[in-house]
Amino acid sequence: MNTNMLINGTQVAGTAENFEVLNPANETVLATVASASVEQVNDAIQAAAHAFKTWQFVSDADLQNAFAHIVKDIRQEKDDIARLITLEQGKPFGLAQFEVDAGANWIEYVASLEIPVETIQDPSGKTIQVFNRPLGVVASITPWNWPFMIVIWHLFPALKAKNCIVNKPSEYTPLSTIKLVEIINRHLPKGVCSVVLGKGAVGQALSEHPEVAKVTFTGSTRTGQSILSHSVESLKGVVLELGGNDIGIVLGDVDVDAVAPRIFGSAFLNMGQTCAALKRLYVHESVYDQLTQKLAEIADAQVVGDGLDTTTTFGPIQNRMQYNKVKSLIDDAVAQGGEIITQQGEFTASGYYVRPTLVTHVQAGVALVDEEQFGPVLPIVKFSHIDEAITAANSTCFGLGGSVWSKDIEQAQQIASQLETGTVWINSHADVSPAAPFGGWKLSGLGYSFGLSGLLLFTKKQAIHVTAE
Ligand code: NAD
């Protein structure tokens, strides 16, 4: 298993302290990895700054060609990559294969985007061209939930805009990122894309570096705030994709059998460890009993186990810290009158297993409803009037996403317009699109990812005023 960093096109071992990568299905050590020293982080940035001198002028045709080769290699090595994802992250192998496929498709979409040049005629008749130029060196810091997909979300828009980039993956899940950066380096000049490994201190050294023009970060709000505070001195830009506490509002007119599997899928996607997962469900009283019963049936039918076992439909939580957090939120909800309506399994394996858990008889004020659980437990709250649900939706510091479930699309759109979130889905949730801007309001983020708006955040404008002699 490769545990090297890739700096300036060369594989190197870290020279600072070691850390272990565990398999969340059984807590065995998958790999011992050496962290980057501050000098090695600096080396990666210097290599990126050097590579940028020529990479910024790469032709669109060469860029397209390189992306196409990268996609081809990813597809050819899909099962090896998916196996690495399951081993380090825990998700079932089929979901890991989906992550690899979706990542390859995402790169193709980014490759197809065109960076526009705007031509303006000023009132005097002068022509002004506005170009979107690359920024220089971008730093990328990624989390442990979708370790292959999210790093693709970071790297490819930055590269497409002709920047150079240095990534630091989560210390919990670095292995599939190492593999991706190795593939990328087969097809791009050295120094254009590097990866450094380590914990938060390595991320901090990377994001604070004065030669980094922009930091793109996906992770917790707390870390995002720290990165933002450190960006002040060198006035670097930041894109922050942070935590959320997405509401799903179910109106009384839904076909329960039709929506229940989709609601379950979007709340428990990746064992609930998805930024844009549905994290609190508000259900109209007229369909509450029927929907909770149906959701419980779906939850109880899941086969929880090691993601590499072909019978498994539901894997472990990724790490012990998150496992403890989810367990304590469930215990606290029960202590405050919450009722668990799903089966609770006893697990003999030493992994971080929690069955998909539904908790009723809870309301705002209980931590499970108010905080981001980021795991396999969903609070379900009954409401009588839509105003109660809208007030609950907006009574949070988060503003990532929300959803409305109804046959009446016009009414759903009207409710959507009242939700204080960057994305609202109607009759779905968490199905992000490479074409649509995605970003959180309030403490859920700063800036956008995806689509042309996300791509353009890796550029800066240059206006060229042309006056005839
Ligand atoms: P985290 O903030 O603990 O860690 C994320 C990354 O930041 C890791 O690589 C970590 O090593 C690094 N890091 C830690 N301290 C740092 C520092 N001081 N400076 C620089 N880097 C530092 O987050 P996590 O636990 O890995 O991820 C879970 C969180 O991510 C959840 O809150 C989830 O909602 C959020 N998330 C958001 C999105 C989104 O698009 N909005 C997507 C996925 C996950």
Image: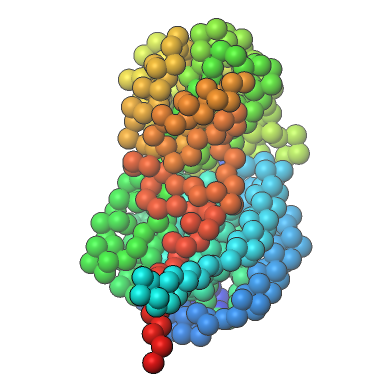
Image: 449 above or below 94: below
Q: Which residue sits furthest left?
A: 233
The residue at 47%/12% (across/down) is 382
Q: Nearer the viewer, residue 447 or 35?
A: 447
Q: Nearer the viewer, residue 369 or 437?
A: 437
Query: Would residue 218 be found to the left or right of residue 176 on screen?
Result: left
Query: Would residue 98 be found to the left or right of residue 328 on screen?
Result: right
Q: Where is residue 104 in the image (x, y as percent from the top left)?
A: 67, 58
Image: 209 above or below 448: below
Q: Where is residue 36 in the image (x, y as percent from the top left)?
A: 42, 69
The residue at 32%/20% (across/down) is 365
- Count of marks, rendered view: 0
Q: Which residue sits furthest front?
A: 124
Q: Quadrant of residue 44?
A: bottom left
Q: Is residue 199 visible?
A: no
Q: Nearer the viewer, residue 192 or 347?
A: 192
Q: Which colour scheme is used?
A: rainbow
Q: In which quarter of the image is residue 371?
A: top left
Q: Where is residue 344 in the image (x, y as percent from the top left)?
A: 57, 20
Q: Which of 4 and 66 is in front in this view?
A: 66
Q: Where is residue 109 in the image (x, y as percent from the top left)?
A: 64, 58
The residue at 70%/69% (across/down) is 68
- Quarter of the C terminus within the rendering: bottom left
